[in-house]
Amino acid sequence: MTAGRFRDEARELLASYPVVDGHNDLPWALRQYAGYDLDHLDVAADQTGRLHTDIPRLRAGGVGAQFWSVYVRTGMAGDDAVSATLEQIDCVDRLLARHPADLAPALTADDMEAARASGRIASLKGAEGGHSINNSLATLRALYALGVRYMTLTHNDNVPWADSATDAPGVGGLSAFGREVVREMNRLGMLVDLSHVADTTMRDALATSEAPVIFSHSSARAVCDHPRNIPDDVLALLPGNGGVAMVTFVPKFVLPAAVEWTRRADENMRAHGFHALDTTPEAMRVHAAFEEANPRPVATAATVADHLDHMREVAGVAHIGIGGDFDGTAFTPAGLDDVSGYPNLIAELLHRRWSRADLARLTWQNAVRVLRDAESVSRSLSSRAPSTATLASLDA
């Protein structure tokens, strides 16, 4: 661990330029563990041992803005996926209403800055997977009206109009309707999120989008060869697009030794009747038994910093950020165990001689800028009518 003086300096820096985290799955954890009963799991109290996220640890971690994922599993198809997404949105809205002194609703970059000025955590929503709109641009617009400010084009499985990084090729990237989804997101001012998508989808989206894109929780493939990570040629396109790649902490995406171990752990989960992404107490007991028999390779804050060093070199410091994926992963790096750990990452980067100006861009400025730029593009497209295209009309 880096020297204490770097952690003190990290906390001081985060007081001025707090973390904008691109992805947190707390709403899904609240669905799994508590059926959305916010009294049963009150995030105003320390939930260590049950959740990665609560308000005291967000404060301790120097978090100034959070994109809350309104994720639903791809096994929920059609209107079931839409309904579950609406339940996730409702969960976030009830969280914000319950904790107004700490969590500030945010729809714009100005809202993020106002929340920071008031000492509250700006709270935005991101939909994780195009299955959440059930091939409907009207549903996309409805999600935007309900406060969703990014949509990840796929999750772990393809959608009819976009290929996922972890599924067999379907349409070869984005279909004609997929490109129309991107254009409609540009018109709305909704950020196009390229985490989870295939390389072909990344390149098609970058070629189509008139606004900056984001990767809400992805790391560097050159450092850890996993299809969920970003290849260098795509990172190199971000300066021309204006987008931001937000490094994630998931061990199997950052530590090469963890890739094969996690594959076997996931197989063990399925053999015991659990979804590989299940983090309920029952599922974690299965994980713990597997880990006891098969010691887990452990990532650290330095592992994540290696990715940031590389991403800064390839994309430039104006095009990187942080997206931890807390409460969406069973395992976390040592020192980044939960949302209180961000000062350890910043301390590691200070130890590596990152400047305060570069760290301010990483933690706060880049993410705020990318949303502001998307808003500007939306205003420039104000004369464009809402699209009435359908999957059948464009992809027949």
Image (cartoon, rainbow, N blue to C red):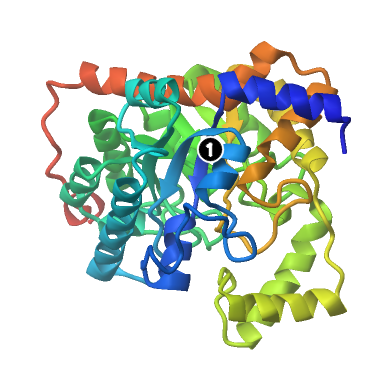
Q: How many numbered markers are drawn? A: 1
Q: Is residue 295 above or below residue 165?
A: below
Q: Residue at x 42, y 39 (%)?
A: 102
Disc 1 marks which amino acid? Asp
Residue 21 visible, this orientation: yes
Q: Residue at x 28, y 62 (%)?
A: 87
Q: Residue at x 62, y 25 (%)?
A: 14
**Residue found at the very far bottom of the displayed protein:** 272
- Residue 187 at what x, y percent from top left? 23, 29
Q: Quadrant of residue 7?
A: top right
Residue 316 visible, this orientation: no
What residue does disc 1 label?
Answer: 21
Q: Quadrant of residue 321?
A: top right
> Quick one: SS at disc 1?
strand
- Residue 273 at what x, y percent from top left? 57, 87
Quadrant where the C terminus sits is: bottom left
- Residue 19 at what x, y percent from top left? 56, 31
Say whether residue 231 is left or right of residue 374: right
Q: Residue at x 88, y 30 (%)?
A: 3
> How many residues crowd mark 1 within 10 Å: few (<14), some (14–19), many (20+)?
many
- Residue 348 at what x, y percent from top left? 80, 31
Say whether residue 60 is left or right of residue 117: right
Pick whichever, 174 or 61, lies toward us. 61
Q: Quadrant of residue 278?
A: bottom right
Q: Is residue 4 above or below residue 177?
A: above
Say whether residue 79 is left or right of residue 324: left
Quadrant where the N terminus sits is: top right
